[in-house]
Image (cartoon, rainbow, N blue to C red):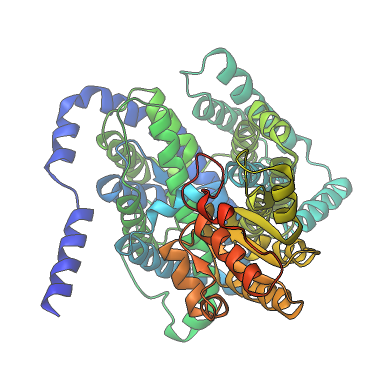
Amino acid sequence: MKVLSGQAVARLTALLPGRLDLAEMRRDPRRDLLAGLTVAIVALPLALGFGVSSGLGAEAGLATAVVAGALAAVFGGSNLQVSGPTGAMTVVLVPIVAEHGPSGVLTVGLVAGVMLVALALLRAGKYMQYVPAPVVEGFTLGIACVIGLQQIPNALGVPKPEGDRVLVVTWRALAEFAKNPNWTAVALALAVAAVMLIGARRRPAIPFSILAVIVATVVAQMAGLDAAKPIGDLPSGLPAPSLAFLDPGALGSLLAPAVAVAALAALESLLSASVADGMTVGQQHDPDRELFGQGLANIAAPLFGGVPATGAIARTAVNVRTGAGSRLAALVHAAILAAIVFAAAPLVSRIPLAALAGVLLATAIRMVEVGSLRAMARATRSDALILVLTAVATLALDLVYAVIIGLVVAGALALRTVAKQARLDQVPLDRGDHSAEEHALLAEHIVAYRVDGPLFFAAAHRFLLELAEVADVRVVILRMSRVTTIDATGALVLKDAVEKLNRRGIVVMTSGIRSGQRQVLDSLGALELLRVEGREYATTPEAIQGARTHLECVGVIPLLPAQESRPLGVETEETVG
């Protein structure tokens, strides 16, 4: 018990910040301060917009950006990661808000945070590398489409219709706009989006998002555009931490949404950290520590009324491009947003919702990398299928189902590819050291098959069908040294094949079975059929000699003394199997 507790303490200690983190923050603080300021300017409209889109309001987005952003910066596993509310998480939260209300979202965030900490302690971060690239690309494309569609009501200046399916809500918003057009809101949204997209191409270093929002707010105020509905009142500061939202009786119904939120937070955060590593030289994130930091961030954010958070790819990319070298930049970003919450809440509350919709529309468009999608679609038909299925599932269902569908399809296609590598090839027993008559006599009664590749459930039945077609022989030799892996299905199919051949009077012998494979075969009784009469051999030459001896005993091939003294011919490079 003491050993286990000691291991747990050591594991937890490894996930906590260390001296190296502090040393990196001291290396170039001026550069990190500038990067943090730039990211805060970019993050402000995004935090407001995603808070509004989630259904909990702009103040929830700001609380998340401040609290989760600071904690994830300190405890996370990446020096460059910037965390906060994201569009992907907003997509998941909308149906939760519709079904369980704001308190349900806060509870889900808290439970998801605990799950993330548990995943970190279980060292689950390394499994992110097994998510195929087409799934990630399709997931990102689907998210971009959903984020863009979510902004349609605010961009059109109509009240958000009822519903938790984005396609249904968008259709209803368009119908409402057709009845009462609000061209002012449309103009503001399109103008902000256009400024961001065009400006990012020409001057990528300038934060056009905040500039566009400021100009749109000033124009709306000075021109008295009543149709441009503002965010509304914001509290001047963060609320006191509270667990008043927690209802223990509702935990059972919120467990499934919490799993979905935790899975998305882990996936997006680790993906964002990997992107940050790829944009720099020498940076390498710790996936388990990243999960730990995101877990603590999501435990704390709901206490202040914040929505669940993840690592934000767009903000992280801005952080890297502006020269950040340590987690100090993400901390500065959170501190500046906190200052805005305390000092400038009245000004922020005047920002038109249409302007924020324009920011998120531009963000959604910039998430779609056409070149990457085109390359992925052209790679293979399987990759294109996975990408499209994941994107469509994201749009039509939800993100977690989309990832599950993408992973299942990708796994099935990968298994099909691996299964095709398993081959059952007939190979010659002799090569060059026997006469043609002797070789013809031997081939008439003995056939050897070399099993190559994995013999597992995806390839096993094809193996059985091929082996069952053996005819006009008395002995079959299975050369097993090149079998890379074998599972229970493969062992059972092999046993079935041996039994069927035996019932037809055909003796089966094997050679080259490896120790690991022997355990699987033995546990399922496949080796019992071979051990009865000593039909399992270490090498192919021994199996051939055993086959000849057996045929001599049953009177099929009388072996001559000259043949017994001559070496058995097999492929010259093979000594076993």
**Residue 97 is at least partly visible in this image:** no
The residue drawn where x is 51% and y is 40% is 46
Looking at this view, name the residue that lies furthest to the bottom: 249
The residue drawn where x is 66% and y is 44% is 138
> Total label count?
0
In the depicted view, which residue is nearer to us: 453 or 534?
534
List x then y, in percent, for residue 192.
63, 29
In the depicted view, which residue is nearer to us: 521 or 22?
521
User: Which quadrant is home to the N terminus?
Assistant: bottom left
Looking at this view, name the residue that lies furthest to the right: 179
List x then y, in percent, for residue 305.
41, 62
Vertical arrangement, residue 33 with respect to residue 548, above or below: above
Q: Quadrant of residue 151?
A: top right
Q: Quadrant of residue 558?
A: bottom right
List x then y, in percent, for residue 148.
68, 42
Vertical arrangement, residue 253 with respect to residue 399, above or below: below
List x then y, in percent, for residue 167.
77, 54
